[in-house]
Image (spheres, rainbow, N blue to C red):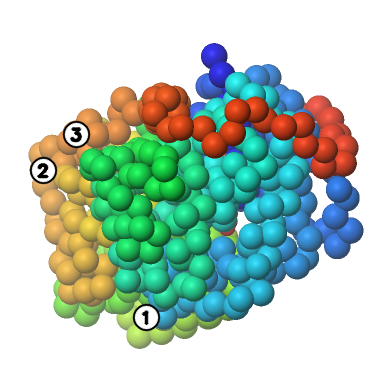
């Protein structure tokens, strides 16, 4: 079996304290635990004095290799080009996008530095799998350094329409960089279609069939691979956690009220302001629900170096505060907003307690919280998922109450419907949602992608015959990893 080499911006090294939240982390951790291999990327540490070393740790069949980012790389590559330019653009929110040419330059340089650090660790028989928008230049940079191993790329976030993408001056070159891979994977068919259209429009790639493009004399395969969760394991965790202290305390604090729950990173794409507006509309238009329902919104702060994220925190506090002061009572607070995440186990218990799960992003690649909410339910007495049609998960969880998150009345109607829904309809909807996720796992997701990558690499002519020995001068440091896993991971 060929070794898999995963390359992602953030590496989920076990037992290194606060592993950062993310659907990517959930999927890759699940895959690597099962399959083993090398996982390479950023350590999560910013250091002024970047030691020119790769830190390596081994845990069972998994090997982790990480580098630190310099302050400039963190500012320009991560916060700047990745999260202030590409992230809003890929989520079709150009009004939040800012572009600075120097950030684009450092983005490419950081991709290059990562390639240089990775090269000495590669073997000719590896399957290389690059993840996400931080590393879009990497397939071309690997080829430029003579790597002939199969290269796959998976985009965890949505891919926008070509017109939208064209707002970033780098768009054409990033698409060409991606076209150096053998296989490009997307969360949904819509993302894949948008990519094919952009590849045609901005890079002149010809579409030979729905899943094959031709560019610069080579074939590149496209595919749809929706990211999955470990649904059975999550269901067991939720059932256990529901009886434990934190959920017990939450339940007591609700004193018989229904819980409406949102769990997200604090991110402009998540539709948090719109969600508060929808809940406010529920209380305005259905006064019966006052004092009988509480919204708990967990909005874990992230990317606080990016202005839009800091502004959002202020706006969310203001909106929730205004609603509470307007509709609250001395003994009832309509919305509880918490700007921190929580332990994964605790959140699973909260999900099982919630009568309504609100997953209403304005745009989202997949949104694994939607799948986790379904997995967490008691099959005998399940809650109802209210899901944005703009989340990738809506393609699979068709039995959820699907909503347009921009319309507060639609959100209020859906919450009212969820809160009043009879047991048999709740069970029926839950069973259909569970059937969509129960047998899928991150390991199967990874296997499907890797099998497709191997097939794709047979049909794509190589650009060079051998991997040259490239000396980067980066010493490799080895250390043991204590065996402990799991922090809360949000989309
Ligand atoms: O794909 C996007 C993603 O990697 C998600 O997995 C996760 O939601 C988020 O970004 C994590 O962001 P960051 O690494 O910037 O904290």
Let me know if residue 233 appears in the view. Answer: no
- Residue at 48% x, 41% y is 181
- Residue at 39% x, 71% y is 166
Q: Which residue in the structure is indicated by mark 1?
A: 323
**Where, quadrant-wise, is the N terminus in this rendering?**
top right
What number of labels is visible? 3
> Does the residue tagged 1 have its C-beta within 8 Å of any atom of ligand 1?
no
Give neighbour class at mark 3: few <14, some 14-19, many 20+ (Cα, 10 Å): some
Residue 483 percent across, percent down from the top left: 71, 27
Residue 441 percent across, percent down from the top left: 39, 29
Of the numbered discs in the image, which one, if any, rests on residue 429?
none
Element type where label 2 sits in the image = helix
Pair 2/3: label in front:
3
Ranked by sequence position, the earlier of labels 3 and 1 is 1
Q: Quadrant of residue 486?
A: top right
Ranked by sequence position, the earlier of labels 1 and 2 is 1
Q: Which residue in the structure is indicated by mark 2?
A: 425
Q: Nearer the viewer, residue 194 or 458?
A: 458
Pair 3/1: label in front:
3
Callout 1 touching callout 2 (CB < 8 Å):
no
Let me know if residue 425 appears in the view. Answer: yes
């Amino acid at each position: 079996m060929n070794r898999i080499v995963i390359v992602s911006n953030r590496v989920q090294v076990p037992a290194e304290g606060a592993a950062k939240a993310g659907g990517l982390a959930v999927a890759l951790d699940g895959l690597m635990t099962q399959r083993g291999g090398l996982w390479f990327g950023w350590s999560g540490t910013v250091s002024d004095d970047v030691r020119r070393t790769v830190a390596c740790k081994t845990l069972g069949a998994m090997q982790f290799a990480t580098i630190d980012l310099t302050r400039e790389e963190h500012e320009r590559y991560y916060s700047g080009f990745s999260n202030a330019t590409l992230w809003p653009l890929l989520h079709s929110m150009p009004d939040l996008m800012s572009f600075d040419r120097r950030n684009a330059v450092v983005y490419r340089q950081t991709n290059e530095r990562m390639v240089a650090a990775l090269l000495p660790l590669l073997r000719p028989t590896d399957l290389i799998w690059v993840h996400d928008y931080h590393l879009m230049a990497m397939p071309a940079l690997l080829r430029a350094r003579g790597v002939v191993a199969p290269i796959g790329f998976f985009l965890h976030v949505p891919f926008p329409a070509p017109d939208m993408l064209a707002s970033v001056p780098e768009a054409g070159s990033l698409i060409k960089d991606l076209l150096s891979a053998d296989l490009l994977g997307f969360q949904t068919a819509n993302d894949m279609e948008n990519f094919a259209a952009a590849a045609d429009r901005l890079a002149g790639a010809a579409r030979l069939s729905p899943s094959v493009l031709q560019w610069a004399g080579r074939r590149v395969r496209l595919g749809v691979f929706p990211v999955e969760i470990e649904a059975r394991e999550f269901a067991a965790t939720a059932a256990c956690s529901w009886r434990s202290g934190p959920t017990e305390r939450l339940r007591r604090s609700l004193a018989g009220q229904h819980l409406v729950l949102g769990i997200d990173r604090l991110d402009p794409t998540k539709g948090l302001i719109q969600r508060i507006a929808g809940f406010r509309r529920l209380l305005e238009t259905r006064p019966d629900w006052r004092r009988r329902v509480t919204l708990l919104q967990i909005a874990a702060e992230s990317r606080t170096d990016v202005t839009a994220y800091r502004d959002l925190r202020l706006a969310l506090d203001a909106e929730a505060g205004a609603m509470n002061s307007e509709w609250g009572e001395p003994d009832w607070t309509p919305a509880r907003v918490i700007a921190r995440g929580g332990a994964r186990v605790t959140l699973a218990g909260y999900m099982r307690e919630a009568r309504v799960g609100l997953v209403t992003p304005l745009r989202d690649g997949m949104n694994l919280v939607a799948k986790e909410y379904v997995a967490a339910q008691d099959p005998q007495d399940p809650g109802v998922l209210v899901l944005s049609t703009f989340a990738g998960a809506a393609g699979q969880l068709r039995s959820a109450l699907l909503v347009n998150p921009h319309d507060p009345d639609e959100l209020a109607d859906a919450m009212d419907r969820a809160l009043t829904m009879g047991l048999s309809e709740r069970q029926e909807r839950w069973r259909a949602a569970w059937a969509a996720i129960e047998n899928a796992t991150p390991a199967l997701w990874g296997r499907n992608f890797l099998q497709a990558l191997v097939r794709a690499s047979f049909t794509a002519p190589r650009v060079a015959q051998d991997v040259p020995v490239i000396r980067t001068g980066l010493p490799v440091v080895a250390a043991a990893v204590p065996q402990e896993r799991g922090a809360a991971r949000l989309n």
